[in-house]
Image: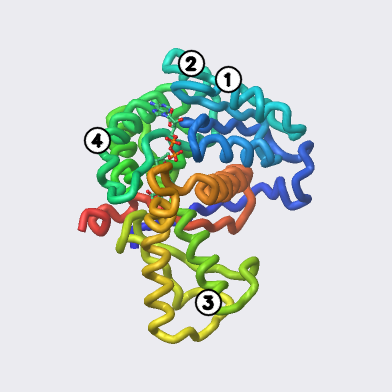
Amino acid sequence: MFRSVARSAAGKHLLRRGYATESVPDRKVAVLGAAGGIGQPLALLMKLNPLVSQLALYDIANTPGVAADVSHVNTRSKVAGYVGEDQLKQALEGCDVVIIPAGVPRKPGMTRDDLFNINAGIVKGLCAAIAKYCPNALVNMTSNPVNSTVPIAAEVFKKAGTYDEKKLFGVTTLDVVRAKTFYAGKAKVNVADVNVPVVGGHAGITILPLFSQATPKANLPEEDIKALTKRTQDGGTEVVEAKAGKGSATLSMAYAGAIFADACLKGLNGVPDVVECSLSLNFPSLLLR
Ligand SMILES: NC(=O)c1ccc[n+]([C@@H]2O[C@H](COP(=O)([O-])OP(=O)(O)OC[C@H]3O[C@@H](n4cnc5c(N)ncnc54)[C@H](O)[C@@H]3O)[C@@H](O)[C@H]2O)c1
Ligand SMILES: O=C(O)C[C@H](O)C(=O)O
């Protein structure tokens, strides 16, 4: 199993009393690729998160408009837009969590690996800047192919001397979100009560939903489990084909990215027992198989 769980250090119980801002520490979150299909709804969802005090929206174009728009939402965080490499330093300085959905999405007929040539370079540049300007931040890697962009980020951080495997996550929450939705439909249970761990990576058969561990238990027949597994593994392709050349999952991904970032913030704030699946490099020998 080469997926890890993001677990908070038990300790301070700052949030036990809920989300009252006076008991919540300041946290800066940056979204890199904030003007994109995922970036825009993710920016909105992070603006709605009361754990965020500063929201930095960075892209190579169009962030001033996105930031102006999102900044009018009457929630806690202060929003700033940053555009172009000259402003990356400002966007990153002081960040606690950096979410990276920068890069190109796939079109029908492509695999996630077909994005490698373009996205590897984008991710490499952004991670070099993270190592320089916010080396202690948690990094939520969303850009595809996640199975490769996470190792690229790790190598950049190792070279800079800032690598911490506990702080680098391949965001696979969308697989969990899909597994929960599909399982609830098949098992005819309330989706809000469903939990399905998903281990592995984020492409094809490396996505391993553990329906045997799903709750509430439903005792589904083997053929249903096989069909659910396949649908979860092919979930991204289902959306890419439905969008017919206009990109891949953006809205469900923004939702998933916001859930994972919220878990990271809770962990940083000392909330106990925060558990989310993600791709980590703790088990590299398995990842390379
Ligand atoms: N992990 C997952 O589950 C998951 C799910 C869906 C999509 N994705 C991936 O997320 C990525 C983004 O998807 P999208 O639909 O938002 O694409 P998009 O093209 O709509 O947006 C990407 C954004 O990245 C920006 N960008 C490009 N180079 C950049 C750089 N150097 N610095 C900052 N920003 C830069 C672009 O300007 C654009 O605004 C794709 O690689 C896609 O495959 C991952
Ligand atoms: O499938 C894609 O290309 C995007 C993303 O990885 C997804 O799972 O929706």
Q: Which amino acid type corresponds to the residue marked 2 in the rendered image?
A: Gln
- Give me the C-alpha separation between circle 1 and circle 4: 28 Å
Q: Where residue 227 sits: x, y (%)?
A: 39, 75
The kind of residue tagged 3 is Lys
- The answer to whether residue 158 is seen in the rendering is no
Q: What kind of element bears circle 2? A: helix
**Label 4 environment density (alpha carbons within 10 Å; few <14, some 14–19, many ≥20):** few
Q: CA distance from mark 3 to mark 2?
A: 48 Å
Sequence-wise, the earlier of marks 4 and 2 is 2
At numbered mark 1, what does the secondary structure look like: helix, strand or loop? helix
Ligand 1 contact, mark 1 (Cβ < 8 Å): no
Name the residue furthest left: 289
Q: Earlier in the sequence, mark 1 or mark 3?
A: 1
x, y percent for residue 165: 38, 44
Residue highlighted by disc 1: 64
**1 or 4: tag closer to the N-terminus:** 1
Disc number at residue 186? 3
Secondary structure at badge 3 equals: helix
Of the 4 image quadrants, the one containing the N terminus is: bottom left
Position of residue 89 in the picture relative to residue 40 (left or right):
left
The residue tagged 2 is 87
Q: CA distance from mark 4 to mark 2?
A: 25 Å
Residue that appears at 50% across and 40% down? 38
Instruction: Work out how far the residue at label 3 is from the one at label 4, CA to CA, in angstroms.
Output: 38 Å
Residue depicted at 48% across the width and 65% down the height: 179
Query: What label sits on residue 117 in the rendered view?
Result: 4
Tell me the element at label 4.
helix
